[in-house]
Amino acid sequence: MSLPRQISTFFGVGLVSLVADYGTLMFLREVFDVSPVYGSLVGYLVGGLVNYILNRAHTFATDRDHVQAGWRFASVMAVGFSLTGLFMWILAEQFEIPYLLARVITTGIVFCWNFGAHKLWTFGERVG
């Protein structure tokens, strides 16, 4: 798949994952009054699961089995999880930016990290 098509597919998968992520955040925040940071982290996990399944099937052609790709995906997602928590804490808690706007900004930052790391490492070609 060409790089522009791969990026657009990754973006499309991201939109589906985003619905799962933001839906979880909004549900937890509005129904259970969970903090924006914790709601974002739970949403990130839900969206991450959707993201793995769809990206493996549609975005990245890989010869890695689920065990190899799975632990790599989890490692990349752990960094993204930490970045999500950090930026949500800074933006929503410290700067008191409305939680959905803070989440949009955070999503943009984490999107860049996730694409590069998944392309080059999680689903990248095996060496040797």
Image (tube, rainbow, N blue to C red):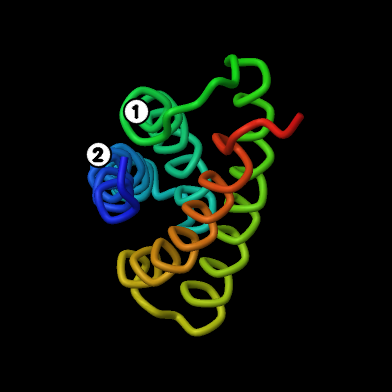
Q: Pick the quarter of the image with the C terminus.
A: top right
Circle 2: residue type: Val
Could you tell me which secondary element the residue under label 1 belongs to? helix
- What is the crowding at mark 1: few (fewer than 14 residues within 10 Å), some, or many (at least 20)? some
Question: Residue beneath label 1, please?
Answer: 54
Circle 1: residue type: Leu
Could you tell me which secondary element the residue under label 2 belongs to? helix
Mark in front: 1 vs 2 = 1
Q: Which mark is residue 16?
A: 2
Q: Residue at x 35, y 35 (%)?
A: 59
Question: Which is more toward the observer, 102 or 62?
Answer: 62
Q: Quadrant of residue 66?
A: top right
How far apart are the two marked residues, 1 and 2, measured between alpha carbons? 9 Å
Q: Pick the quarter of the image with the N terminus.
A: top left
Q: Quadrant of residue 16?
A: top left
Q: Residue at x 58, y 51 (%)?
A: 117
Whichever of labels 1 and 2 marks the residue nearer the N terminus, that label is: 2
Task: Check whether the beta carbons of the residues at disc 1 and disc 2 lie within 8 A of each other.
Answer: yes
